[in-house]
Image (spheres, helix red, strand yellow):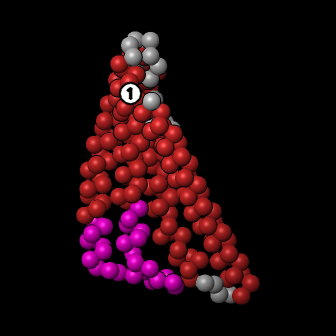
Amino acid sequence: MLISGLQRINDWLGRACIALATLIVGFAVFAYAAAAFERYVWGIGLSILNDLPPLLIPWAVFLCMGVLFRLDRHVAVDFLPAILPPRGKAVLHLALAALTLGTAVVFVLGANEALAFFRRFNQMTETSPRFPLWWVYLSFPVGFALLGWFALERLILSLRDLGAGPGAKP
């Protein structure tokens, strides 16, 4: 009962992350196309159309990291699942989830320290309009926290699968 509620929340959270990342990538494509058009037609272009997309791409990347892990769409070497029995696959999923969760926690802690460092400097971007540069770095702890959250779900599901017995699917 509890896990199905968590899965529903994570389904919504995953869709929201993908939607936001899609909007960011769509804006980047539009901005670069508009900048090229401006330079072609008028000979000059707005600098924000060239400067803003690279500042937003970390948000697209780090938001999708956990979603891709959750959906098993991440980069992986898939020879082990092909040769392992079902229980071995469940153990492998459990180990990967635990390793990913532990790594995500370490990266969230490190990213929070880096974020605090950049906030102390209070640097602003060189774009127009200007905004604090730490906003870009905020994507790191947010993305790794989401990765840890989705890894926790995978860990719980793997434990459930292992506890269900030999006929359970991982």
Q: Measuring 38% from the left and 65% from the top, which residue is drawn there?
A: 138
Relative image position of residue 97 (x, y in whole percent): 35, 35
Among the 4 quarters of the image, the one containing residue 114: bottom left
In terms of secondary structure, where does tag 1 sit? helix
Relative image position of residue 163 (x, y in whole percent): 35, 19
Is 93 within the magenta? no
Q: State how many labels appear.
A: 1
Q: Can residue 93 be seen in this view?
A: no
Relative image position of residue 99 (x, y in whole percent): 30, 38
Residue labelled with disc 1: 158
Is 123 within the magenta? yes
Q: Can residue 147 be seen in this view?
A: yes
Residue toward you, 89 or 33: 89
Residue toward you, 27 or 79: 27
Q: Measuring 52% from the left and 76% from the top, which residue is drawn there?
A: 51
Point out the image quarter for the N terminus: top left
Describe residue 160's horizontal placement relative to residue 34 as left or right.
Answer: left
Q: Which residue lies furthest to the right in this view?
A: 41
Q: Residue furthest top?
A: 166
User: Residues in magenta?
Assistant: 114-139
Kind of residue at badge 1: Ser
Q: Residue furthest front?
A: 1
Query: In the picture shown, does residue 97 fall above or below 109?
Result: above
Describe residue 91's horizontal placement relative to residue 39 as left or right.
Answer: left
Among the 4 quarters of the image, the one containing residue 102: top left
Residue toward you, 51 or 68: 68
Q: How crowded is mark 1: few (under 14 residues within 10 Å), some or many (20 or more)?
A: many
